[in-house]
Amino acid sequence: MSAHSDPTPCTVVTGASNGIGRAIAEALLAQGRTVVNLDYVPPSWNHERLVSYQADLTNTESTAAAAARIAAAHHVTALVNNAG
């Protein structure tokens, strides 16, 4: 039995709140994927299959804590490391 609260496969996209990351997330959502956005700012947009977590990806502790929360709650099957 999985420890994930949501068994739906999903893609994590870093920096999906704006710009190229948002475009990537929207393309994945259009394909029917669930997307987890990991960014330091919350998105100004929403979608029923978009879940967002805030973290400063330049900070190891912040990134590790967010990754642990995401791994516990979602069945991550892909990662798009878009954040620069």
Image (cartoon, grey):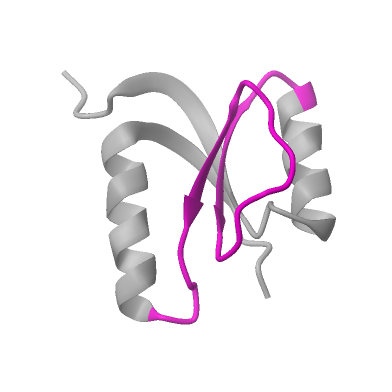
Q: Is residue 48 placed above or below 67 in the rendered structure?
A: above
Q: Nearer the viewer, residue 81 or 52?
A: 52
Q: Nearer the viewer, residue 74 or 78?
A: 74
- In the rendering, at what x and y percent does residue 40 appear? 55, 66
At x 36%, y 45%, the residue is: 70
Q: Is residue 40 placed above or below 75 in the rendered structure?
A: below
Image quarter of the C terminus: bottom right
Q: Is residue 25 left or right of residue 38?
A: right
- In the rendering, at what x and y percent does residue 44 appear? 73, 47
- In the rendering, at what x and y percent does residue 53 appear? 47, 50
Residue 61 placement: quadrant? bottom left
Residue 35 placement: quadrant? top right
Secondary structure mostly seen in the magenta stretch: loop
At x 52%, y 31%, the residue is: 10
At x 36%, y 57%, the residue is: 66
| Residue found at the very far front of the displayed protein | 44
Q: Is residue 3 left or right of residue 29?
A: left
What stretch of residues is rendered in magenta?
Answer: 30-59
Q: Is residue 5 placed above or below 59 in the rendered structure?
A: above
Image quarter of the N terminus: top left
Can residue 32 be found in the magenta stretch? Answer: yes
At x 75%, y 54%, the residue is: 21
Q: Is residue 42 left or right of residue 3?
A: right
